[in-house]
Amino acid sequence: MKKFGTALVCAALAAAACKGENKDRSSAPTPAGSAAPAAVEAAATPPAPPAPAEAAADAAVAPDAAAAPDATGPLKVTYRPPKVGDIIETTFQQHTEGVMLLSNQKDPLVQHREEVRTAEVLAVKGDAVTKLKVTFGKVVSYRKMGFQVLKDQTPLEGKTFLVTAPGGKITITDKDGNLVSGDAFRELRSIFVGQVGKPDPRKPFFTGRTFRKGEGIVLSPEEMKAFALPSDESVKPTRMTVTWVGQEGDVATFAITSLMTGKQGPMTMTFDVKATLKLEVSTMRPLALEDEAQLRGTGSMELEAKMTGSEIYAYPSK
């Protein structure tokens, strides 16, 4: 749920690299919504990023039984509203490597995050989820700048939260009913804003048209809003194209390209994104998303980086 559409922009991770102009070269910038680093390992090398998640994506693609549409088209996607008791298992990873230039000094920059979580729908209204229970499993987050590795503490690992949106405003409590604030709230809000309390904004795009194989659809400004990053309104898509490229049974594959720009901290950022989305035709549920982006920041500090990411979704029966 976090990156279907929103993941296409990759801005959340890049924001960590440009969160304020840090003149102290002994510490890396802190990602938005992250706690202070727990430890600094001088001259350490972070673990290599995990292998691409193609195998996990294949395992996750186990759609409900349905008549398989023609793999050559035209393609019509239908929508299944959320139901109480729905379970969504998400495996997320994102890795960025690049170079930051500040005061004529270049520093290598690495940022990495892995996250596993399970969400259960507790209440719905129409097409909108209004109450969600989320339990986090393993969360790994680290950054490297220069020769230092900073392992981020996370307030989410192993914990359960309830997410609601009364009046359209995200509210989060722990399992005991206590309001969540601070870093945990910011991290959770960045994941679920726009996905709890409101219908999926991408429904009109995917269900309101007929797709023809290999035909790129250039999104209108209004359609691009549905794919923007709700947690960071400073970054907006300026160009986006979606192309249906293939189908196997009830699973359709879309190629997505996007150019996004915006001001983040001291830099004007540009994100040139290429993504592959696997979507269940009979429900519009995302199954897998893999993306790659070239990031460039200009201003009082500069950034050149490459980001790769994946998000795998599974929907086990309760």
Image: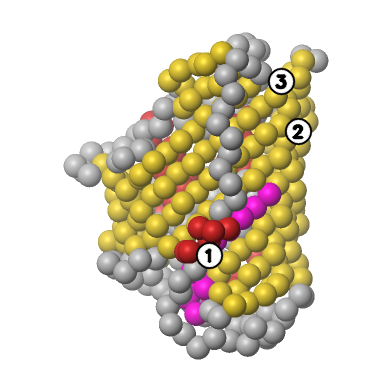
Looking at the rendered structure, the secondary structure element under dot 1 is helix
Residue name at image x 31 percent, y 40 percent: 158
Instruction: Tell me which segment is drawn in magenta.
Output: 280-292
Q: Residue furthest right?
A: 104
Label 1 CA crowd tier, 10 Å (few <14, some 14–19, many 20+)? few
**Would residue 34 appear left or right of 8 to someone viewing this image?**
left
Above or below, 3 against 128 in this view is: above
Res. 107 mark: 3
- Measured as percent of width and height from the top left, residue 42 is found at 56, 13
Looking at the rendered structure, the secondary structure element under dot 3 is strand
Looking at the rendered structure, the secondary structure element under dot 2 is strand
Report, in whole angstroms, how far the alpha carbon at label 3 lies from the one at label 2: 11 Å
Q: Which residue matches tag 1?
A: 58
Above or below, 1 against 64 in this view is: above
Report, in whole angstroms, how far the alpha carbon at label 1 lies from the one at label 2: 32 Å
Which amino acid lies under the numbered mark 3 shown in the image of this protein?
Answer: Asp
Q: Earlier in the sequence, mark 3 or mark 1?
A: 1
